[in-house]
Amino acid sequence: MSRVVFYTATTLDGFLADPDDSLDWLMRQEQDHQGALNYEEFIAGIGALVMGSTTYEWVRDNLERSGEAWPYELPTWVMSSRDLPAVEGADLRFARGDVRAVHAAMLEAVGGPAGKDLWVVGGGDLAGQFADAGLLDEVVVYVAPVVLGAGRPLLPRRLDLELLEATQNKAFVAARYRVLGPLAEDRPA
Amino acid sequence: MSRVVFYTATTLDGFLADPDDSLDWLMRQEQDHQGALNYEEFIAGIGALVMGSTTYEWVRDNLERSGEAWPYELPTWVMSSRDLPAVEGADLRFARGDVRAVHAAMLEAVGGPAGKDLWVVGGGDLAGQFADAGLLDEVVVYVAPVVLGAGRPLLPRRLDLELLEATQNKAFVAARYRVLGPLAEDRPA
């Protein structure tokens, strides 16, 4: 069953990036790359990616600065209402509007509902749009030992989750959640 | 060594309460009361409490509604710039201004630096004031499997923490952190 997974790092107080989109607080943390919920095992199960324009531009700017190549071999949808320059060597599909159409196209790319999982790279509002459509299955977080007090919100919605696993991975708490849907208090009686 | 500990529940996205100060999302979660970082063991090590006015009024209102008695036997400082009505049977000391003076008075109440720990009950800004003064030693969080997108912030500061332990306690991730101080990126070079 192809699941939609929001796999991300966050601060303890729920920010994906600081107000200037800096990830310096994240990059200096230690992790065990073979440990719980590690990226290598995660990405092996993924067939397609989707990211918002802010995330895309952050990755693109960082690659430009570092001179590194686009890090993903998988087809990647970029949601943006603006026309954005592409990155050489990246398998990009620009899209806008309803995430349901994007989800359908991504599913097709992985060979249908029995295919590999789909990764919502970020940001939080894009993950929220998938949740709004009832399409977000899991949230996997690496919680960095940092509070920022302000920044880009993790998942700006009211949702109930179910904790599936939680372990320490060096500096991080690594936790995996199933998305249950709207907060119980918000559901019609 | 008497430590100052901010022991609290939070959502995965770092809110202590929803925008209406509701904790309904918290009260319905399952926990193992004998499990990791449980309240009974925690409170056994505590000698005095301090809370902000919003937290105090929340507790007071809930006791009035439920008819229950004040739940803490320990001396409790309430930080408020306003005069607040007391709760019968509670050992309350109202205070305002610098948390350093309050900390000194609390230390004296527990018999000095070798005494029991001090509990910052909430809210987040009060914990932040202790951190600003270099007086916040630990943060212990029960992370509920919920995102709210808005509400009362956990700890509205930029701080580096160090993860000391993390385990699942039923619905929650229970994690304990040492407070290291201002975020590395904000410290003078």
Image (spheres, coloured by chain):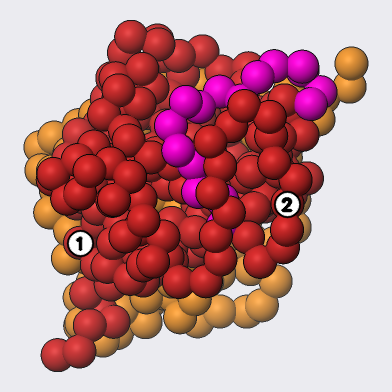
Chain colours: A red, B orange
Write down the region rendered in magenta: A64-79
Pinpoint the chain carrying mark 1. A
Q: Give coordinates of residue A81: x percent, y percent.
A: 66, 66
Mark 1 or mark 2, whichever is nearer to me? 2
Residue A149 visible? no
Is residue A119 a member of the stretch shown in magenta? Answer: no
Which residue position holds label 1?
A: A180
A163 vs A38: above or below: below
Front-most of A31 and B97? A31
Q: Give coordinates of residue A130: x percent, y percent.
A: 38, 62
- Badge 1 marks a residue whose secondary structure is strand
Name the image quarter holding residue B25.
bottom left
Front-most of B52 and B187? B187
Structural crowding at the residue carrying mark 1, measured as other residues with C-alpha within 10 Å and reported as few (<14), some (14–19) or many (≥20)? some
Q: Identify the mark at residue A84; answer none if there is no mark.
A: 2
Left or right, B53 with respect to B27, comes to: right
What is the three-letter code of the residue carrying label 2? Leu
Q: Residue furthest bottom?
A: A189
Left or right, A111 with respect to A120, comes to: left
For the point 56% across and 42% down, the residue is A92
- Badge 2 marks a residue whose secondary structure is loop
Q: Give coordinates of residue B49: x percent, y percent.
A: 45, 49
Left or right, A181 with respect to A118, comes to: left
